[in-house]
Amino acid sequence: MSTTSPAGPAFDPSGQYRIDPETLGAQGRSFAVLLLHRRCASCWGTLLQQPAQGLDIEAEEHLEQVQAHCASAPDFIHSALPVMETLFRILLASGNQPMTAEELHVALRERWADPSNSRVPAPEAVARLLSRDAFYGIRPVSAPEGGRRSPA
């Protein structure tokens, strides 16, 4: 069931989102480079010693490293990051598995574990932010004709 909001498109609580590398490519952006720039300090120490400094690594390998290693670094997600950057990093930490706005909201609230932080948007606001994304390539996961969503 969707609800209509005067501030934006209908909110579908079951709608899922993920980063779409094809959207990034159509925008002239590289998913691999975006991932490279989210690698942790210890990874950068190693990457800078390589001739291509990580630019020759495929997006899938970066994503695996971010999920398995970098996402657990204390500074990977912190309350000083902008909301969209944090949502992007939450999706990276999940291996870019589709997540609902509610799941992203919960992860955001947990990762921004600062009781004085009142910036955690409600799930409807998360969906609205994601629907307006023009930088990170975050898109709704398409629903096939059977009504069930797939990771595309």
Image (cartoon, rainbow, N blue to C red):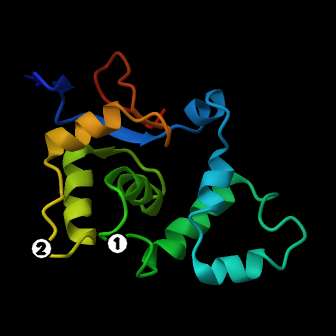
Q: Where is residue 50 shown, x and y percent of the image? A: 85, 74
Q: Nearer the viewer, mark 2 or mark 1?
A: 2
Where does label 1 land, which residue?
78
Q: Where is residue 84 shown, x and y percent of the image? A: 37, 50
Q: What type is the residue that disc 1 sits on?
A: His
User: Position of 70 compared to 53: left or right?
Assistant: left
Q: Residue 24 occupies which quadrant of the picture?
A: top right
Look at the image and tell me in which quarter the N terminus lies: top left
Q: Which residue appears at 18% of the width and 58% of the height?
A: 119
Q: Where is residue 140 shown, x and y percent of the image? A: 37, 32
Q: Is residue 93 above or below residue 87?
A: below
Q: What type is the residue that disc 2 sits on?
A: Ser
Q: Is residue 2 above or below residue 101?
A: above
Report how far apart the C-alphas of labels 2 and 1 lie in the structure: 13 Å
Where does label 2 land, which residue?
116
Q: Is disc 1 surrounded by few (<14), some (14 to 19) or many (20+) residues within 10 Å?
A: some
Q: Where is residue 4 shown, x and y percent of the image? A: 10, 21
Q: Residue 105 occupies which quadrant of the picture?
A: bottom left
Residue at disc 1, secondary structure: loop
User: Position of 31 compared to 148: left or right?
Assistant: right
Q: Residue furthest right?
A: 51
